[in-house]
Amino acid sequence: MERRLAAILAADVVGYSRLMEQDEAGTLGTLKRHREEIINPKVAEHAGRTIKLMGDGALVEFASAVNAVTCAVAIQKAMSARNEGAAQDQRIQLRIGVNIGDVIVEGDDLYGDGVNISARLEAIAEPGGVCISGKVHDEIMGKIGEAFADDGEQLVKNIARPVRVWRWMPGPAAPAAAPGGSLPLPDKPSIAVLPFNNMSGDPEQEYFADGITEDIITDLSKVSGLFVIARNSSFAYKAKSPDVRQVCRELGVRHALEGSVRKAGNRVRINAQLIDGTSGGHLWAERYDRNLEDIFAVQDEVTAKIVDALKVALTSSEQTRREDRGKVDPEVYDCFARARAELYKFTAEGTAQSRALLERTIALDPNFAPAYAWLSVVYSSNYVNGWNGAGPGNLTTALELGQKALDRDENEPEAHRAIALANMWLRNLDEAERAAERAIALDPNFAGAFTVLGAVRDYAGRHESAIEALQQALRLDPRYHLARQFLGRAQFFLGRYADAEATFKQRLIEVPRSDMTRAFLASLYGHTGRYDEAGRMWREIMEINPGFSVEQYTGALPYRDPAWFDHFLGGFRKAGLLP
């Protein structure tokens, strides 16, 4: 039995049966031209060998993962250009998957997981897009100029182990900040703080290293003279050991902070180094060995070093706020760090654990303002997601907790964000907007507050200003898919359907099983006369969430203007999906 390592490209025509039913001769003729004029020449150009052709698909072998991926992208770009001007129901689109692995050779045919996984990747690719495995991505990093978005580990049909998936889409739907891509630099000193390594030798201490990283991000974020990437996007690089220069290109910043944390009893050792993202050179490195109760002082010193190195001046109010920080009870800090780690799991169980830990934090230190603010967010999150028996009373409690945080520290941005969030769902949009704006005034790099502000303005009917706030949120946090969903909604209501479609498709790359995003795309396709695509979206929604109800979903959204609901439901009616 002969075996060899090969990169396998699997391609398939989207909606082939429907196209054949509509026009069998025309579909076959068009597909033949595409093969002769686009697919076969691109395969030959990239040294590929076609293993087999099916009626609506193909398997191609390459000796190089780089050749396979560049061929896949070249085919999709050429197909996209060929489809321009063609009627929507006559376009031929491909899905393509690429994997690299050991294959079994039998004559001119190939078998094995290397082939099977490429076929499974093709099946989950977006129309016009490419899915590649993690193995392929490792091979092509830094070798091609295309942007792929990390979609995490996915369970695919008939493959026992999860497969790491990376996605590519052409044109405006391509990832805004994905590996291989880049963002322009801001007009002020800019930085991303990468997750500090846990050097304690205990995986259970991971939450503590993450907490230190997050606190440094928060400290830097409050400096108005800096541009600071949000935690969510920085933590996308956790456990990946990326090239810092590449990270800076992808996130659009000039500098990065790396570090490590070792915790032993009530002692903590932190190593930190500031790196120039252009050259990869170190600007400074420092080691701190302190008692855990002095952790805030260490964080202050790290921030001060960065501010000094980047020649950023603190305003008088920023300087005053930094002087207020003192020692912290080690048990309080540890409990609070665990609570945040649980909340970031975004599950019902995680929020339940987070609530218990935050209540314990408050019991240990009734004056620790951040604990009240985060507990407020827990109550709002339970309400929005319907977790842990939550009801409208959750929002009243969330408001009360947010106010308790402010009573202890009126300059706590998280408290203002928490109050904005609760007021938004209570439909107190004016109060919500004021609170979000105050959070941003205290923390000019607070992507979460910009997201809430954008959502509130969208609900209030001020869609243009909502778009501005949400675009700023996404610049600070390029991987924040919830802000992207809100941005798409605002674009959709303004009738900017091309922009909205690109935004929603990008979110589906980030959150492939989102029923809400598909609902907006279904309505959008109804408004633009693409009824087959609207129907496809609806079928996918029912597969993902059979209990999904358009009416129930819209009823939960606090829009002031009833015209919004008419517009949203109108797209479904045009497509024949609602009476």
Image (cartoon, grey):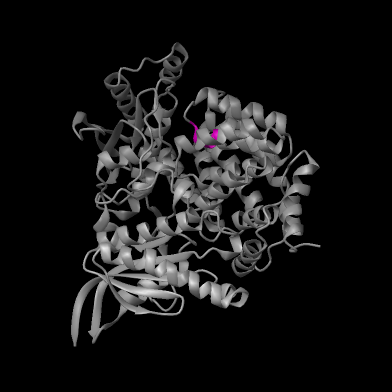
Residue 419 visible somewhere in the drawing: no
Looking at the image, residue 222 sits to the left or right of residue 462; the answer is: left
Q: Residue at x 27, y 21 (%)?
A: 309
Q: Is residue 179 above or below residue 228?
A: below
The residue closer to the viewer here, 351 or 461, is 461
**Image quadrant where one finds the C terminus:** bottom right
Residue 506 screen position, x and y as percent = 50, 50
Residue 99 seen in render? yes
Task: Answer left or right for 143 relative to 33.
Answer: left
388 vs 252: above or below: below
Which is the main secondary structure of the residues drawn in magenta?
Answer: helix
- Please tell me which residue lies in front, 577 or 555: 577
Residue numbers of the magenta segment: 446-450
Say which of 127 and 113 sits in front: 127
Quarter of the image with the N terminus is: bottom left
Residue at position x 41%, y 57% from top? 78
Residue 449 inside the magenta-drawn segment: yes
Q: Position of residue 368 (x, y in %)?
A: 51, 32
Q: Is residue 340 above or below residue 294?
A: below
Question: Of all residues shown, which one is farthest toward the top?
Answer: 316
Quadrant for residue 214, please give it.
top left
Residue 37 image position (x, y, % from top left): 38, 65
Q: Considering depth in this image, is 568 or 106 the residue closer to the camera? A: 106
Does the segment drawn in magenta span residue 519?
no
Q: Is residue 464 left or right of residue 186?
A: right
The residue that appears at 26% across and 40% down in the rendered structure is: 244
Residue 220, image x, y percentages: 39, 28
Q: For residue 325, which quarter of the picture?
A: top left
Residue at the image point whose x is 61% and y is 59% from the top: 515
Rendered position, 272 above or below 34: above
